[in-house]
Image (cartoon, grey):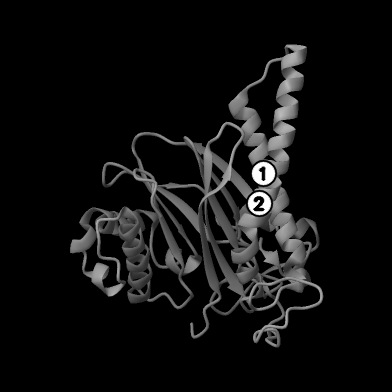
Amino acid sequence: MDYMEDTTSIHPAFFTWVDGTAMHFAGVFDGHGGTHVSALCQRQMHVILAEELAAEAAHFLLRRRHHQRLQVAWVEQDEEEVAWRAALMRAFARVDALADLACACGEATLPRCACPLSGVVSCFPCVGSTAVVALLVGDRIVVANCGDSRTVLCRRPAGSPPVPLSDDHKPDRPDERARIRSVGGQVLYDRYRTPRVRALLAMSRALGDRLLRPAVICEPEITVTTRTMVDEFLIVASDGLWDVMSNKNACAAARGCLEDGNNHPMAAAVGAVGPDQERRCKVAAVFLAELALYMGSRDNISTVVVDLQNRAV
């Protein structure tokens, strides 16, 4: 774990939907084979997604006017979700298409980036990244996931079962294994009994990884969840956390930070002392990462905690 390949991306109010509702963005990107694709995601995913949402918003308004003229039934919420799903699918595909151009700094341009990292070439056969993106839009949480990073919804009261809003894309997941085999791919196990696509990649979906196409795809799975009064916070994290900690234990640990605030011993350590709820979220995120290390995680760990009660992150 001497080289950090994970990135995070947080952009409050990065886009405004057609009804004036602000959309908030939080993403975690767990790179492998270098920082090229995870840094690309950090730089570009929210930018490209905003472009795709703008295109979908225009189409949404046209479709709504058309339905009104024809006096055809129109279910606003359903149509919004169709638009958001389409925007996310295209955004993931566009970022994936840039992966081969990506510099280790995340720039993807022609001519090639000339920054100090431009000479960094991966010595691994697979260069790519997971991508899990959580959008807060009014009373809904939209999560798009590609890979084995994860978003978990934690609810009140303490002890309530957490709700996973994404499903890890592991090669031995029955539907993923069947999909891989249907295109001629193989799921093989290494000496630690970890399932890998063609004995290389320990996830079945990712951005980048051209060598493993079509077995490894960049298509995200998308969930839309309507928020309730008992929804407390989200944890968006890479598998460095989830490999050693259950959803339930992660929620309990983060909850303690959000409730303790300045009294939590981690607050001063991360320079997050103050009344601001955003500082408490920072404390919770750092505490989860430190706890995962203590529990023996040997992978990069990136965590984002989103307070749904106070709209802080």
| Residue 199 placement (x, y as % from top left) | 67, 75
**Farthest top residue?**
71
Counting every numbered tag in the picture gives 2
Q: Nearer the viewer, residue 38 or 113?
A: 113
Mark seen at residue 184: none
Residue annotated with mark 1: 53
Q: Residue at x 30, y 71 (%)?
A: 271
- Residue 178 seen in this snapshot: no
Asked where in the image residue 40 lies, by quadrant, the reply is bottom right
Q: Residue at x 61, y 76 (%)?
A: 35
Secondary structure beneath dot 2 equals helix
| Residue 158 placement (x, y as % from top left) | 26, 46
Q: State the quadrant of the C terminus.
A: bottom left
Q: Are marks 2 and 1 in contact (CB under 8 Å)?
A: yes
Q: Residue at x 31, y 43 (%)?
A: 160
Q: Nearer the viewer, residue 109 or 248?
A: 109
Q: Amino acid at mark 2?
A: Leu
Above or below residue 36? Residue 145 is: above
| Residue 204 placement (x, y as % from top left) | 66, 62
Above or below residue 165? Residue 170 is: below
Q: Nearer the viewer, residue 169 or 152?
A: 152
Asked where in the image residue 265 lies, by quadrant, the reply is bottom left
Q: Residue at x 81, y 73 (%)?
A: 110
Above or below residue 153? Residue 183 is: below
- Residue 252 seen in this snapshot: yes
Q: CA distance from mark 2 to mark 1?
A: 6 Å
Q: Is residue 130 left or right of residue 111?
A: left
Q: Amino acid at mark 1?
A: Leu
Q: Is residue 23 left or right of residue 180?
A: left
Residue annotated with mark 2: 49
| Residue 276 placement (x, y as % from top left) | 29, 55
